[in-house]
Amino acid sequence: MKKTIALIAHDGKKPEMVAFVKDHIEFLKKAHLVATGTTGSYVKQTGLEVELKLSGPMGGDAQIAALAAEGKVDGIIFFRDALGKHAHEPDIQMLMRVCDLYNVPLATNPATGSLIIEGLLEDEL
C-alpha cells in the first residue's frame, strides 16, 4: 500500500516546496500525495498527482490534521513562514499538536523533509 505524504507551504515558501518536490520526485512518484489547495496546485505543475484539500486559511490545515488523527497520513511536510503572522495560526498549532499526539512525522524545513521522504519511501524505489 502506498504511503501518504501531506504537503503544505505558506505563500512565501511555495517556490521552495516546488523545488523540494522536484529534488525528490522519484521518491514522491511512489507516494499518495495530499496537499492544501494552493500548495497542491503548485505541486501539480511538476506532473505529480495530488489530492487537493481546501487552502490552509480556509480549513486545509485542519483537514490534514484530521487525516493525521485518523491514521491516514504517514508524514507531513509543512514549510512554514516562521517570521510571518497567519490568521489561521490556531489551525497550524492544532496540526502540530495532532502530529505530536499521534506520532506523525512532521517536517518544517527541507532537511527534515528529506529525511521523512527517504525514510518512508526508501523501500518503494
Image (cartoon, rainbow, N blue to C red):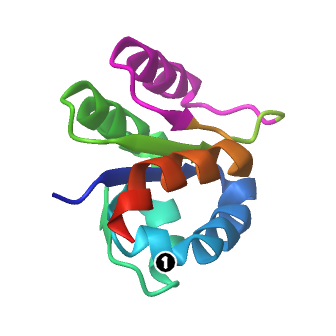
Q: Secondary structure at mark 1?
A: helix
Residue displayed at 23% across by 60% down: 2
| Residue 35 in sight in this render | no
Which residue shows up at 66% across the image and 42% down it? 112
Q: What segment carries the magenta color?
A: 84-106
Image quarter (top left, top right, bottom left or bottom right) of the N terminus? bottom left
Q: Is residue 81 above or below residue 110?
A: above
Q: Is residue 104 above or below residue 76?
A: above
Residue most extreme to the front: 123
Indicate the quadrant where residue 109 lies. Answer: top right
Residue 34: x %, y % from top left: 34, 57
Q: Position of residue 71 (x, y in %)?
A: 21, 32
Q: Which residue is mark 1?
A: 26
Q: Residues within 10 Å of mark 1 (few under 14, many from 20)?
A: few
Picture quarter containing residue 66?
top left
The residue at the point 38 percent across, 44 percent down is 60
| Residue 86 pos. (x, y %) | 66, 33
The reply to whether residue 118 is visible in this rendering is: yes
Give the amino acid at mark 1.
Glu
Say which quadrant the C terminus sits in.
Answer: bottom left
> In screen coordinates, is 51 left or right of 95?
left
